[in-house]
Amino acid sequence: MLKKVFLILALILTALVIFYFINGHEKESTDPIENPENEEKGSQHNDNTSNPSHLVSKVLELAVEGKVLHLPFIAGKTNIQEVKNSWGEPEDIETVGSGAYANYLDHDATLGYRNALVFDVRSYHPDLHQIHFNDIKKTQGEPDEITYYKDELYDQIILMYQLNENYQLKWILPKPTDSEPNPAVHHISVLSLNYEKTPTSLNQMNLDEKIGQMIFAGVEGTKPNDEVNDLINRYKVGGIIFNKENLVSPKQTIDFLNQIQLQNAGNLLPIMFGVDQEGGRISKLPGNLTQLPTNQDIGKINNPTYSYKIGSLLGKQLNAFGFHIDFAPVLDVNSNPNNPVIGDRSFGENPDIVSSLGIQTMKGIQSQGIISVVKHFPGHGDTSVDSHLELPIVNKTRSELERIELIPFKRAITDGADVVMVGHIMLPKIDPTFPATLSEKIIQGLLRKDLQFNGVVFTDDLTMKAITNNFDIGQAAVQSVKAGSDMIMVAHDYNKIVTVIQALKAAVTKGEISEKRIDESVDRILKLKKNYNVQNEFIKNVDVDELNRLTGEILKR
């Protein structure tokens, strides 16, 4: 009987030991990083707060996939709109380098994004503060690179680890000192290295975004307003042209452009900024820049090398201010002395000289990574009225155009012109119905088929009276796209811009324009942006003195 009692007691004791062993082991092995309850509670005291090596390992494990501790977003894959849908609008947005950074203080996070894609995920979560300088090196080894950052508030060391071809992990800590040789982590950054900066797939875009890319809009004022923001956020226009009244000083100009870039950073595609900076009297950049000679004066010198240097200088000026497109050079041959709009903007009346000097100016602009737009196809030099005021008529046959007007454009296309602007010129012997900007015979026939131009076709400004006095602007835009134009310029009046956008969308919806035709233009625009690496780059300041120094050197010849 006694043996049975001892046996029962032994079994009970064994069961208790097994129970406490299993229960205790489960508690010890519970990982608060992976436990959803602890994830919600944030940085409560748990086993891992005393185990920084485990935290470093966990950070590393997530970072190789672009993920960050306690955050649901992935660098290089998350769209900024997904973040806003989940967390709402950020407390504030800053610009750092070429990205916009949204600060979400309530989530201990900052998200860097560009072209709508989050490429940098930064976490300031309290759990990370348990990790110290020596813990990182002990667990992860020596960094691939060490850099430093210092300003009025911070004196930091940045330990950079190249995890794989896709991601880089940065540990940011106070710089070690004699008094604090082993500082705690301030924050971490997981950076996507090879995300697609400019999408090239039309499948990523809806119809509204495609039509928006085809609009080059003008804006009013000297800083962003509701209309400017609407053009960017609602209509997602592909570019903005700035007129002289928009640009009053270097600082105001770069602030204006930077603010628009910041607004556009949440969109899928970067926005292009354009300006007429031809030299001579058509010079719209501000800041007491040294005046460049007119094309007419350059034509008298007739030195292609000099023209290239002038073009290069124009490109440097635009780069300094943050522009992407120069609507220059003019390739019109000034064959009519009574021409009221071209005049000294032309290199002269000899098409060979216009070709030689114009092409070198174009190449000089392109050499600085700026898009050059040659204009005004098929030639505005033999007009006697200003297309800003009325519709010019040129009564020339195709063969007559080939002897003068077409020569510079044909040679420029052969020599690498990326963009051609078509002028508002009526050529009744070629198309008795439509001016060049709306003419399929001129754009698709003459420019595309005969001259074999495969680049981007811009219209001149549709708000000019040559168009508005004779056509409804919405229908003019529709006809221009049907004729072969890629980018429709509406350089003034927000309401006219909206009218054009709505007319183009209605034309696609009704089947008047196929979406395939829209895709053809957008594909050319995407390639142009990619070829010139158009990005949301933020400009800090403009060194006008340096630009003037360079100008002085060139003008000495």
Image (tube, rainbow, N blue to C red):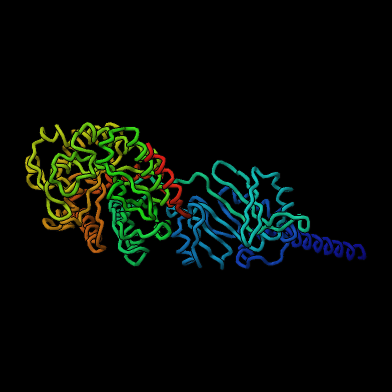
Give the residue displayed 56% in from the left and 65% down from the top. Answer: 107
Q: Nearer the viewer, residue 99 or 491?
A: 491
Q: Residue furthest right?
A: 2
- Vertical side of 359 occupied by 122: above or below: below
Visible in this render: residue 209? no
Give the residue displayed 63% in from the left and 68% down from the top. Answer: 41
Name the quarter where the N terminus is drawn.
Answer: bottom right
- The spot of residue 145 in percent (x, y) is 64, 44
Q: Is residue 338 left or right of residue 488?
A: left
Q: Nearer the viewer, residue 151 or 261?
A: 151
Give the residue displayed 27% in from the left and 45% down from the top. Answer: 521
Name the quarter where the C terminus is drawn.
Answer: top left
Visible in this render: residue 117? yes
- Vertical side of 296 occupied by 108: above or below: below
Query: Which of the 4 quarters of the picture holds residue 183?
Result: bottom right
Query: Which of the 4 quarters of the picture holds residue 249?
Result: bottom left
Q: Residue furthest front?
A: 556
- Vertical side of 201 occupied by 411: above or below: above
- The spot of residue 482 in percent (x, y) is 18, 47
Q: Say how many tags the image has.
A: 0
- The spot of residue 330 in percent (x, y) is 25, 42
Q: Is residue 297 left or right of residue 148?
A: left
Q: Nearer the viewer, residue 221 or 146?
A: 221
- The spot of residue 542 in percent (x, y) is 45, 53
